[in-house]
Image: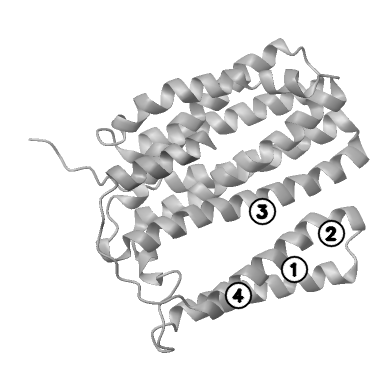
Amino acid sequence: LPLGIAALVLSALWVPRLPTYARSIDKLSVVVTLVGMTSAVIAIQQGPGLGWPWWTFVLLIGGIGLIVWFVRLQATASKRGTEPLVPLPLFKNRNYSLGAFSISTMGFAVASQMLPIMMWFQTGRGLTSAEAGLMMVPMAVAAGLGSPLVGPLADRIKPRLLSVFGFGSVIAALLWIAGIMYTDAALFWFIGASALLGVGNAFVWAPNSVTAMRTVDLRYMGAASGVYNTTRQVGAVVGAAAVGAAMQVGSASLGLHQGMAISLVLPAAVMVAGLIAVACFENTLTPKG
C-alpha cells in the first residue's frame, strides 16, 4: 500500500500529460471479452480436477468463440460508431506484436511458477511458509540489483540481445529448478537457480517493454500500453490455471515431487515461444554519430 500510494503521487507529479484520442468505450466489447476469458479460464482450471464434464467443454468452446467475436468487434468498431478497445493497426508494428506476445509468455511463467515451487517446499520438503519465502530471496536480490543496470542498456544495445539472454535465463532457471524438484536434491542447489531466475527477470521486463513501445504511433500509445499490460495479465491468468491443472494431474499420476517438477516444465515450454519471438525483434535503435 505505501508503494502504491507513492506511485500514484509521483505519477501525478512527474508523468506528463499526452494528447488523448479515444472518445468512447465499446461496452459490448468489454462484456464479450470479460465473459469469454472467464469462461475459458474456468474450463482450463476446473476441467482436469473434475474429469472434464460436458459443461467444461461448453465453457471452453464458448469462451474461444467469444474471444474470436471480440476480435471481430474490434475490426468493425468504427462502422458501429464506437472506439475499439484494441486498435488492430497496432499489430502491424512488428516489434509491438512480438513484444506483446512475448510478455504474455513471461506473464504465464511468473504467475504460475510459484505454485509448484511453494507446494514442493512446504508439502514436499516440510518448510514453513516463511522459510519457503526466504528461498526466493536470491531471485529478488538479483532482479533488484540487475533491473536498474539493464534498463539503460535497452537504449544502447540491440533489442534482441538483451531479451534473448533474459528469456533464455528464465527458461534455464525453470528447468534447473524442475530438475532439483524431480530428484529431490539438496536445497543448496536452489540458491543458484533462484538467483538465475532473478537475472532472467531483470533482462526481460525493461528491454521487452521498451522495444515493444518505442515505435508505436503516438495516436495509439495509450491503447498500446493498455493492450501490452493486458496481454501480460491474460498470460498470467491462463498460466495459473494451466499449471494448476498440470499440478493436479502430475501429482496424482507421478507423486508430489515428480508431479510438481513436471508441471514446472510447462511455463518453461511456453517461455520458449517467447524466446523465439524476441529473437525476431528488429533493431529500432538510432545509430549514434
Q: CA distance from mark 3 to mark 2?
A: 13 Å
Look at mark 3 in the image and give the residue it sits on.
238
Mark 1 belongs to which amino acid?
Leu
Residue 182: in sight, yes or no? no
Mark 3 belongs to which amino acid?
Val
Given residues 72 and 168, the one toward you in this image is 72
**x%, y% of residue 279?**
42, 43
Look at mark 4 in the image and give the residue it sits on.
31
Q: SS for tag 3?
A: helix
Query: Mark 1 or mark 4: which comes first in sequence?
Result: 4
9 horizontally vs 127: left or right: left
Q: SS for tag 4?
A: helix
Query: Mark 3 or mark 1: which comes first in sequence?
Result: 1
Mark 4 belongs to which amino acid?
Val
**x%, y% of residue 149?**
35, 24
Residue shown at the point (25%, 63%) measured from the top left:
19
Look at mark 2 in the image and give the residue it sits on.
47
251 horizontally vs 267: left or right: right
